Image: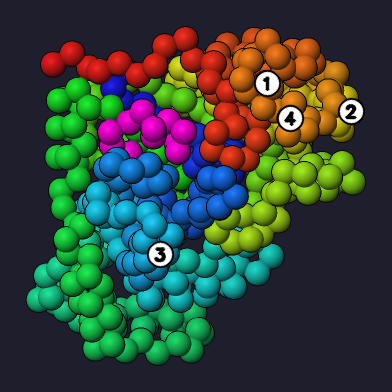
């Protein structure tokens, strides 16, 4: 198992950053394969909290190669700030590499993002306003600036001399009122290119060669399955492909080099922004879970909507990514709240629904059907340490039943169990660790 893909199995915010950080200890290379700085991964090391937005979580493990793949859209200003922040906290960035094929977020992308969202009025998607969608749109329309362009001043200037007037006309049509300064944009992005040049390279070659040489490579997704541009709750989705298959395309390697997939599943469900959410709790219990779980966006600070675990959603994620294991996170948050509900299927017009419908109106009509499980008492610090040291048998009986219920329903083993927020508060239930690919 030299290559392992980690994907979110819900609407994001499942705790992928912490799981990737944990697994990165065994990896040689960690690759981020999609999304932009609209994603946020938080890792708590001791009492220090690291918030990452573009840089892969593996950067926090000394000696690992951290790669931003071609499937990511890069805001170079945000990237440089994140790099500087990491260095100020004693984290080395010498092994960071950025794909020369990754598309770049430009100032007009952020302006267009805001203008388009305002024009939607009552049909807002709930974007972060960071220019992610317009950047991906330009990529598909063959109007994108790529990282390779930033280190070639002539190529950058030639492209922007065409693009900036075009984007100005779009902003004028939207009634935005912003004025783009071509020369200022060229100067700003040439400067970014100078500062980032040593990190920009053909990362696909690095990743492919690493796997073929028997190195262990970990692939890190940004958003969750239900935000996938094709398979999520469209149009309330992100602008990229979040499922495991994109780990190959978004990193520049053959899919034949991918071995296993872990899906990160929060023990309850959350989502940020607009869109349907069948198991949402809008009462005091939902607010209690949000408060206990610290459910605020790493990137935006926006409060997350909370609800019961939805196995229709996670089963759908399994069908799309082919999960070999589940990393079940934040199970500790459910301690002390009484009986727990888990959605096993939906009902609509008397029919049993086990797959997410494409028609959102139909999804909104779906009534979640629940199984009720007994809860457990809240776990204090000494009890958690005892559980971590003694293993699965030391867990409260009802917590073990909850884990087993998820495994039985999804038909996928729970391989990692998150019992707390810190990086070392994960119970490792894997039967075997990573193995090197035979050369």
Question: Can you identify the residue that label 4 sits on?
Answer: 382
Question: Can you identify the residue that label 1 sits on?
Answer: 387
363 on left or right of 218: right
Which label sits in the foreground, 3 or 4?
A: 4
Q: Position of residue 178 (x, y in %)?
A: 45, 87
Viewer-proximal residue, 167 or 44?
A: 44
Q: Residue at x 14, y 40 (%)?
A: 205
The crowd level at tag 2 (other Cα within 10 Å; few <14, some 14-19, many 20+) is: few
Which label sits in the foreground, 4 or 1?
A: 4
**Who comes first in sequence, dot 2 or dot 1?**
2
- Where residue 200 sits, quadrant-wise, is bottom left
Query: Dot 2: what SS?
Result: loop
Q: Residue 283 colored magenta? A: no
Residue 98 seen in the figure: no
Q: Residue at x 16, y 78 (%)?
A: 157
Q: Residue 21 colored magenta? A: yes
Which label sits in the foreground, 4 or 2?
A: 4
Viewer-proximal residue, 173 or 336?
A: 336
Residue 386 seen in the figure: yes
Spatial distance from mark 4 to mark 1, Cα to Cα?
Answer: 9 Å
Question: Can you identify the residue that label 3 sits on?
Answer: 88
**Who comes first in sequence, dot 1 or dot 3?**
3
**Who comes first in sequence, dot 4 or dot 1?**
4
């Amino acid at each position: 198992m030299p290559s392992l893909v980690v994907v979110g199995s819900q609407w994001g915010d499942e705790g992928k950053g912490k799981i990737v950080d944990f697994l990165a200890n065994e990896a040689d290379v960690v690759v981020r394969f999609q999304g932009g700085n609209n994603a946020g991964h938080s890792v708590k090391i001791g009492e220090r909290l690291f918030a990452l937005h573009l840089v892969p979580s593996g950067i926090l493990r000394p000696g690992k190669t951290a790669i931003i793949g071609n499937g990511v859209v890069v805001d170079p200003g945000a990237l440089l700030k994140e790099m500087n922040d990491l260095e100020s906290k004693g984290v080395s960035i010498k092994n960071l590499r950025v794909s020369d094929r990754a598309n770049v977020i430009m100032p007009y992308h952020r302006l267009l993002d805001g203008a388009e969202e305002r024009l939607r009025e009552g049909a807002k998607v709930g974007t972060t306003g960071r220019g992610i969608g317009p950047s991906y749109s330009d990529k598909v329309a063959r109007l994108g600036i790529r990282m390779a362009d930033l280190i070639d001043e002539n190529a950058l200037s030639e492209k922007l001399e065409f693009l900036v007037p075009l984007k100005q006309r779009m902003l004028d049509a939207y009634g935005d009122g912003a004025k783009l300064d071509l020369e200022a944009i060229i100067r700003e992005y040439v400067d970014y290119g100078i500062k980032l040049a040593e990190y920009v390279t053909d990362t696909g070659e690095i990743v492919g060669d690493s796997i073929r040489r028997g190195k262990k490579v970990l692939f890190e997704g940004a958003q969750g399955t239900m935000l996938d541009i094709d398979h999520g709750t469209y149009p309330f989705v992100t602008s990229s492909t979040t499922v495991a298959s994109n780990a190959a395309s978004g990193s520049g390697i053959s899919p034949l080099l991918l071995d296993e997939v872990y899906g990160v599943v929060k023990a309850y469900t959350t989502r940020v922004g607009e869109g349907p959410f069948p198991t949402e709790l809008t009462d005091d219990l939902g607010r209690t879970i949000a408060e206990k779980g610290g459910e605020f966006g790493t990137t935006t600070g926006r409060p997350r909507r909370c609800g019961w675990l939805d196995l229709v959603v996670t089963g759908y994620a399994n069908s799309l990514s082919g999960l070999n294991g589940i990393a079940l996170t934040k199970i500790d948050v459910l301690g002390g709240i009484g009986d727990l509900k888990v959605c096993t299927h939906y009902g609509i017009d008397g029919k049993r629904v086990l797959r997410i419908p494409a028609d959102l109106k139909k999804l909104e009509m779906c009534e979640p059907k629940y199984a009720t499980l007994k809860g457990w008492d809240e776990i204090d610090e000494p009890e958690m340490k005892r559980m971590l040291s003694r293993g699965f048998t030391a867990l409260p009986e009802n917590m073990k039943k909850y884990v087993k219920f998820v495994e039985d329903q999804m038909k996928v083993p729970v391989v990692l169990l998150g019992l707390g927020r810190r990086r070392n508060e994960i119970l490792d239930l894997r039967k075997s660790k990573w193995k090197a690919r035979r050369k």
